[in-house]
Amino acid sequence: MWQGSSSQLSVGVQPEELLTSFVVLPEQIDKKTNTIKPTRLSPRRNPTNKRLETSVCRSSSLTEAQVWEICSAHFDVHARKPAIGRGVGPASSVFAEKLTFDPDGTPYPQHANIIGWHDDADKPDNELKHYWMDQARRMAKKFSYKPRS
Amino acid sequence: MNLAIPMRDCRLIGYQDYEPVSDVGEKLNRKWAQEKNYLKGSASDWLPTVDAAFRSIRDDCQKAGWDGPGSLAISDRVLAITEKVVGALFTLVPKGIPAPDVVPEGDGEICLHWVVDTEQELSISIGLHGKINFAGQFGKEGMIHGWQPVDTTSATALDRSLQEIAKYVARLFQPIVSRSAA
């Protein structure tokens, strides 16, 4: 199996790079606009460092086959069903929301987390979520849906 | 607490103006709204659409990890609350408004999403914490986002707590009358 290579990746994510977000269910696709639903880009709190993160794959330098190899190895194994497709959008849509990236390269070289989401230690997540929904809503419009090949 | 950005007030039609003063009045008001909107089998009926989505969520999202590493299971309780909210909103919004897309979320909650086009949409997110988070855009009128409490202890309390959300949904689909058409 292709294990991935970080040789073509810049240290930081560039605005012109394309990002992939894997889609598991048809409900995560907006059929009217052929984009992914904003929920797919909403962050989850990392239980280890408590940081809000959205997991994405830096896919500009990958072939379609390589993208789906990564999905099979690192995403499908956790899900009840394999991903049916992916949302593909520019990193510029993330920067437009004043968010940034942690290109951690774990568990595969192209992995990155979208970080910098609105946070407030004095408030519970269920009173902050609307901030994330608002940002994810605008970003999701830029993520076109592509079915799995 | 509602953190929504204030927008011009939205006046809904007919029964929304009636303010019952007793429990009996509230029950009658609710019944009237249900009868007015509940056209089973018609395009106005949300139930067939949302039922299919709920079945899909029950089948696919009740184990942690369904949406990749770290995603939380969607519990029967979240599904039950969401079904109540959908049922209540159907009776509160004007007839003819389409059913929302029902979208499972990786944090164990469920999102209801109405989309008119890329500039007009509304999402509400429902969990077990008694709050609804919402975010939306109403074309050139602007954007909103915020949260508000939701009371599921009775049908009447639920209706009361969803009034503002129902107004947002109605506003999303209100007809736009252009000057030339007027």
Image (cartoon, helix red, strand yellow):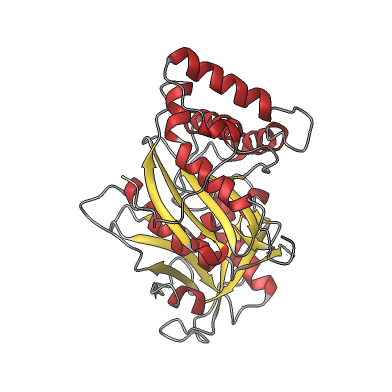
Residue A18 quadrant:
bottom right
The x, y position of residue B24, in whole percent, is 48, 12
Tally the marks. 0
- Residue reaching furthest top? B24
Residue A143 quadrant:
bottom right
Quadrant showing the N terminus of chain B: top left
**A124 and A75: which one is in front?**
A124
In the image, taking residue B172 as reference, residue B95 lies left or right, namely: right
**A135 and B144: which one is in front?**
B144
The x, y position of residue A43, in whole percent, is 42, 58
Please give the name of the residue rendered at 59% of the width and 82% of the height, measured from the top-left corner. Answer: A61
The x, y position of residue A144, in whole percent, is 65, 68
Please give the name of the residue rendered at 44% of the width and 47% of the height, measured from the top-left corner. Answer: B107
| Picture layout, residue B60 above or below residue A96 | above
The answer to whether any part of residue A61 appears in the image is yes
- Residue reaching furthest front? B182
The x, y position of residue B130, in whole percent, is 37, 35
The answer to whether any part of residue A91 appears in the image is no
| Picture layout, residue A141 above or below residue B105 | below
| Picture layout, residue B94 above or below residue A140 | above
In the image, taking residue A79 as reference, residue A48 lies left or right, namely: left
| Picture layout, residue B6 above or below residue B102 | below
Quadrant showing the C terminus of chain B: bottom right
**A58 and B134: which one is in front?**
B134
**A86 and B177: which one is in front?**
B177
Please give the name of the residue rendered at 56% of the width and 41% of the height, measured from the top-left corner. Answer: B12
